[in-house]
Amino acid sequence: MSTSRMEILELLAKGKISADEAADLLSKPAETATAVPAKVITPESALKAAGDGQKPSWLHVRVRDMASGRNKVTVNVPLGFVKLGLKIGGRLAPELHELNWHDVEDMMMQPGVLVDVENEEGGEHVQVFID
C-alpha cells in the first residue's frame, strides 16, 4: 500500500474526511491521490473542535452533489472578514439597522452547523458551518 493510501486511511480514521471522500481519493490513480489536503474541514470536525474548546476562525459554505458526493462549490472565509462585512453592511444598508449585530456576532463564535439544506429535486446538499 502506498504512502498516499495510508495518509487517506489515516485521515478517515481521524474523522478528517468522510468515507465517501476517502473512497473517491482511493479510486484515483496514484499520481493524483498524493495531493491529499492536510486538513479537510467538515461540519462534524467543526463540532468536534467546539468540544475541544478551540476558538472558531472560519465560515465555510459547501454545496455537494448528492448523487456523486463531490463538492460542487466550496467557500472558506475568515471570520474576521465576515465581521468586517457585517459592520460595513450595517452602516450602508438602512434595512439592516433593526438587526441586533451583537447576537449575530455571538452566533458566529459558536462552532458548528448554521445551515443544512438538502434540495432533493436539484440533487444538492448545502451546508454553512463555522469552525
Image: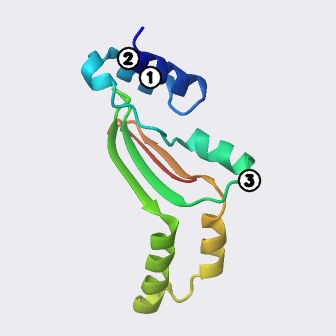
Q: Quadrant of residue 65?
A: top left
Query: How far across and down, in percent of the image, does residue 51 sit?
Result: 74, 47
Q: CA distance from mark 2 to mark 3?
A: 32 Å
Give the structural element (helix, strand or loop) at label 2: helix
Q: Which residue is mark 2?
A: 26
Q: Which residue is mark 1?
A: 22
Query: How far across and down, in percent of the image, does residue 36 sit?
Result: 39, 31
Kindly identify the amino acid type of the residue bearing the numbered disc 3.
Answer: Gly
Image quarter where the N terminus lies is top left
Q: CA distance from mark 1 to mark 2?
A: 6 Å
Q: Residue at x 60, y 39 (%)?
A: 44
> In this orientation, does residue 88 appear?
yes
Toward the top, the furthest residue is 1
Give the structural element (helix, strand or loop) at label 3: loop
Q: Viewer-proximal residue, 127 or 36?
A: 36
Query: How far across and down, in percent of the image, does residue 8 sit?
Result: 46, 23
Toward the front, the furthest residue is 3
Q: CA distance from mark 3 to mark 1?
A: 27 Å
Reading the chain from its start, which is encountered first: label 3 or label 1?
1
Q: Which mark is residue 53?
A: 3
Q: Is residue 43 left or right of residue 68?
A: right
